Image (cartoon, helix red, strand yellow):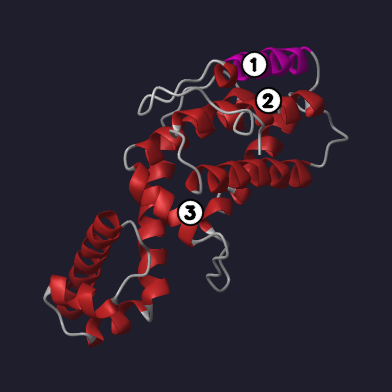
Amino acid sequence: MTTKAKRAEDKSALLVSVARDIIRETGDFDLPMRQLAARAQVSLRTPYELFGSKTGVIRAILKLDQAIFRELAKELTSADWLDNILDRVSLGVRFYAENQPFYRALFRATQAYSGGDETEPARENLSAFRTLTRRAQLSGLIREEIDTSILGETLTDLFAANFRTWASSSFDISLVDAKIGFGFAMVLASAAAEPHASRMRERAMRYQLAVQSFVDPTTGAAATASENTAA
């Protein structure tokens, strides 16, 4: 790597770090580029040269997070591919739980997000869910007649809808795991071959109980009737 390239890489990393701090402090993804440049102690031209726009900076933050999450997902020790799908959801929830205000702001700000050729952040798992359902099918866990491309997209829709609901609500993120888990387990139960379908139905009932008995750790309040309905 040339000295110039290394300098650009270092500035990019600095700007991404500062941008994350600003978003965390304000809870808003309306990132002022002038403020970003001033906090990073670079010229106003620099973030535009490196990222093109405010959207480019946000995409850089997301790509970094996605890379970190993919590495964490590799360490999952699930019993099979169906469990891996559910474990991946729980891992994602824990990942977002480390900074709820930041990710609430992210999902609120990006409900109508358009990143050119890339999808909105709430649907970034589409490729992963399609791959995982296909692997489950090849392992004999999902019936052969099921189109795993459609199945993966359906799971992505459930995932994205629940996170959008969470972002625009006030309940703690721990409820999201149970809500998405319930929806995923029900869908997978309808697609899975026996005896795996029965196992997914049992998982769904455990998730249902978790939703029914949920008490928000920050407020002490139980989930409302509207929150008990999977998005």
Left/right placement of residue 74 relative to residue 28 reads right
Quick check: 145 above or below 150?
above
Left/right placement of residue 217 relative to residue 228 reads left
Q: Position of residue 118 (x, y in %)?
A: 56, 66
> Mark 1 = which residue?
203
- The quarter holding residue 2 reads bottom left
Check whether the beta carbons of the residues at disc 2 and disc 1 lie within 8 A of each other: yes
- The quarter holding residue 228 reads top right
Q: Is any atom of residue 161 visible in this view? A: yes
Left/right placement of residue 108 relative to residue 226 reads left
Q: Position of residue 74 (x, y in %)?
A: 44, 35
Label of residue 110 in the image:
none
> Mark 2 = which residue?
185
> What is the distance, in whole Å, between disc 2 and disc 1 at their CAs?
6 Å
Outermost residue, right direction? Answer: 145
Q: Which of disc 3 and disc 2 is earlier in sequence?
A: 3
> Mark 3 = which residue?
107
Q: Nearer the viewer, residue 70 or 22?
A: 22
Q: Which of disc 3 and disc 1 is earlier in sequence?
A: 3
Question: Which residue corresponds to the image point at 63% horizontal and 28% vertical from the top-left?
Answer: 225
Q: Nearer the viewer, mark 2 or mark 3?
A: 3
> What is the distance, in whole Å, between disc 1 and disc 3 at their CAs?
27 Å
Q: Amino acid at mark 2?
A: Ala
Secondary structure beneath label 1: helix
Secondary structure beneath label 3: helix
Q: Position of residue 94 (x, y in %)?
A: 40, 33
Q: Amino acid at mark 1?
A: Arg
Q: Which of disc 1 and disc 2 is earlier in sequence?
A: 2
Highlighted range, magenta? 195-209
Secondary structure beneath label 2: helix
